[in-house]
Image (cartoon, rainbow, N blue to C red):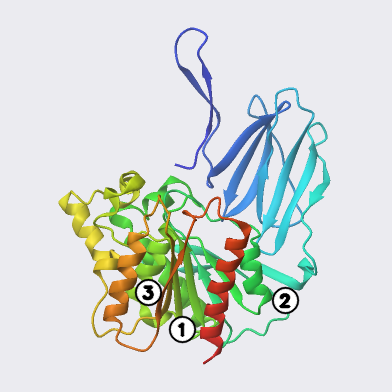
Amino acid sequence: PNGKILTLNISDKKFQWKELIGEKTFPISGASIAGDKLIINYLKDTISQVEFYNLQGKFIKELHYENIGTLSGFNGRFDSNRTYFEFSNFTSPQRIYELDLKSLEYSLYWETTIKNLNINDYVSKLDFYQSKDGTKIPIHIAHTKDLEINKDTPVLLYGYGGFNIPILPYFSKTFYMWIKSGGVLAVANLRGGSEYGDSWHKEGMLLNKQNVFDDFSYGAKYLHSKTIGSPETTASLGRSNGGLLVAATMLQNPELFKVAIPQVGVLDMLRFHKFTIGWAWESDYGEPEKEEDFLNLLEYSPYHNIKQDMCYPTTLITTSSRDDRVVPAHSYKFAARLQDLQSCSNPILLRVESRAGHGAGTSRDKQIDEIADIFGYALQTILED
């Protein structure tokens, strides 16, 4: 479940497997061979831990890096004498280093520069909280170092929780703008991803999908218990499968969020498989044509769980008219039904981007406009009260 390194001998027309490096407590996120070194990147509580081995599987040393976050790269060939790797976290823009494969010493090769950004002015820490069933969930909390954090501080809670995809510390100009504007960024590493290997994924998929929504909701409760914002200052954000996450949790726990922003979300869980690539998601969600899966999906499907006489958070639903992955009908239907049944004055808005798809390939201008609309509206809604 956490991965291991094997050798395969096929010279005698037989598959002869041999374990080279056994499974460890934490999962392997990547492995490569460069020069005469086997380089393995482990995830230790969402933080990269890189170890070097010789080709016989003998441990050489661990890469000691000055900061904690995400390390990636380390590609090369058998005859390489150097390789390159990148470092990033929520408050440090990307840096690329050159690594000597003989001495295993590294030096700075290139770094991202952002005007007026001093990384010493920001802080990012890793914390843990308990979900509904007692499972320990990692959460990264980032903000300016001098920020006075209290119940009135704007908080952006972000999550994904699905398809074996980990959400690791990385620098995002989108998140940076929220932090720079005086908000707290909180990224919860929910079940459904691969932060702790295959078992973490399985605990958040199919009949276990409700665990993901509980993890996210309990993340908000944890922040509020620490007086890091409050239900009146917390915005939830997620894209695609994360859009499902935001929509499901705002319906199940509307009292936890001031603003909900489900982006390009999968919102009709009984018909998702009928459009474009939707059938491929049955591996994580289940098959709506099967009774057990159907009943499970019906329990949390956002479109089918909007209730009358409920006051839901201010909601900004985003989609793109040419999204051929999660078709915009999901967002259109959800927005229409939510607008119809909303029982208080909190607005329900739908933002539709024309001439754009699921996100990849969207022009820089359109990305900037979307970020400005989303965060500007969220901050205005939070701060005006």
Which numbered marker is on residue 72? none
Q: Dot 1, how many residues are within 10 Å of its Cα: few (below 14), some (14-19), or many (20+)?
A: many
Going from N to C along the chain, the mark reached first, 2 or 1, is 2
Q: Quadrant of residue 73?
A: top right
Residue at the image position 79 percent from the left and 59 percent from the top: 113
Q: Is residue 198 left or right of residue 233?
A: left
Give the mark toward the camera: 3 or 1: 3
Name the residue nearer the viewer: 49 or 207: 207
Going from N to C along the chain, the mark reached first, 3 or 2, is 2
Check the image and report above or below for 245 versus 294. Answer: below
Indicate the amino acid at tag 2: Lys
Indicate the amino acid at tag 3: Met
Q: Dot 3, how many residues are within 10 Å of its Cα: few (below 14), some (14-19), or many (20+)?
A: many
Q: Secondary structure at mark 3?
A: helix
Q: Which residue is mark 1?
A: 231
Q: Secondary structure at mark 2?
A: loop
Name the residue nearer the viewer: 139 or 368: 368
Q: Quadrant of the N terminus?
A: top left
Q: CA distance from mark 2 to mark 1?
A: 23 Å
Indicate the amino acid at tag 1: Pro
Q: Position of residue 30 (x, y in %)?
A: 58, 40
Q: Which residue is mark 3?
A: 250
Q: Position of residue 156 (x, y in %)?
A: 54, 73
Q: Is residue 52 left or right of residue 363?
A: right
Going from N to C along the chain, the mark reached first, 3 or 1, is 1
Q: CA distance from mark 3 to mark 1?
A: 11 Å
Residue at the image position 63 percent from the left and 50 percent from the top: 48
Q: Secondary structure at mark 1?
A: loop
Check the image and report above or below for 102 versus 180. Answer: above
Q: Position of residue 334 (x, y in %)?
A: 32, 68
Q: Which residue is mark 2?
A: 145
